Amino acid sequence: MAAQIPSTHVDILQKKAFANFATVNADGVPHVTPVWVDWDGTHVLVNTARGRVKDRNLQQNPRVALAIADPENPYRYLGIQGRVAAMTEDGAEAHIDKMAKKYMGKDKYPYRAPGEKRVLIKIQPEKVHVVG
Amino acid sequence: MAAQIPSTHVDILQKKAFANFATVNADGVPHVTPVWVDWDGTHVLVNTARGRVKDRNLQQNPRVALAIADPENPYRYLGIQGRVAAMTEDGAEAHIDKMAKKYMGKDKYPYRAPGEKRVLIKIQPEKVHVVG
C-alpha cells in the first residue's frame, strides 16, 4: 500500500510549505490545521504536542490526509492520504528545533509551552496525487 | 451548535484564499484538498462536481473541516469544523462562474468537463478557531 512522492513534486516538501493536516476523531469528525512539514525520504513528518486534537484523534484513528501547496504557486500541490507508521517522543524535541530552523531560521523553537511534550508523527503515504 | 465567523477574520473568506477542505469516507479515511471558497454571511460555500471524492464522502458523512490561511500571511488563519446544511445542483453552475470571477477574473469558469454536474455545498460552521 506504500506510495512514493513523485520526484517532480518532492521539492514542495523541502520548501517552507505548510501541510494542511487532516485527522478524524472516533465519531468521524474531521479536523484540519496548517502545520510545518518534513520528509525523511520515506515518511512525511509532522510534529505536534501531547494532548492536542491531532494527538488525541490519532490515538483512535491512524488515517490522515495532507494537502501541501507550493508556496510559490497555489495551483501546484501534493495531496497525500496515509497512515501513521509511528508516533514517538524520541527525537521530537530535536525535530521541532529542526523545523524552527527550516521555517523561521531559528536554532531553537521559540514557542515551547511549560510542560509541553512534543510528539513526532511519521506518516506512510498510501495514495499520492499531484496537481500542476 | 451554529458558530459565527469572527468579524476580525471574515476578510480571509473574501480574499482569494484557498480552503483546505477535509471530508471523511465511510471507513474513517480523511481526504483533504485545496478548493475555492465563498461565504454567504451564514454558510461557507464550496463548489464541487458530482462523483468526486468530496461528493461521495459527503453522501455518507456530512461532517467537514476547513483550514483557510490568509494568502498574505500563512500564520493567520481560520479553522472551521462544521456540517453540510445542503448540497444542491440548484445555482451551482452560476456559483462556479462567480468563483471563476473571484479567483481568476473570468466571467465563465473555463474548466468545465463534458457531462460534469456542479454541486454547491453549503456548510454550517459549528466550531471556529482563529490564529493570528
Image (spheres, coloured by chain):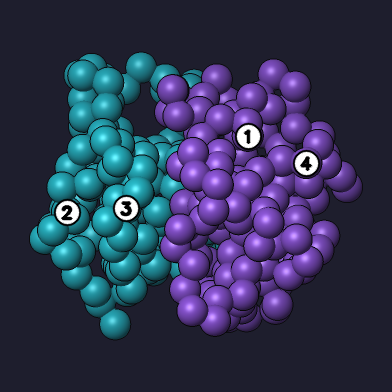
Chain colours: A purple, B cyan
- Which numbered dot is residue A13? 1
Q: Are marks 4 and 2 on the same chain?
A: no
The correct choice, above or below, for A81 with respect to B127 in the image is above
Q: Residues within 10 Å of mark 2 (few under 14, many from 20)?
A: some
**Residue topped by disc 3:** B77
CA gap, disc 2 and disc 3: 10 Å
Left or right of residue A3, residue B13 in this image? left
The label nearer to you, 4 versus 2, is 4
Q: Is residue B41 above or below residue B113?
A: below
**Chain at tag 2:** B
Q: Is residue A18 left or right of residue A4?
A: left
Going by the numbered disc 3, the residue's amino acid type is Tyr
- Which residue in the protein does label 4 denote? A40
Name the amino acid type tagged 2. Val
**Relative to the observer, which residue lies in front, A38 or B46?**
A38
Amino acid beneath label 4:
Asp
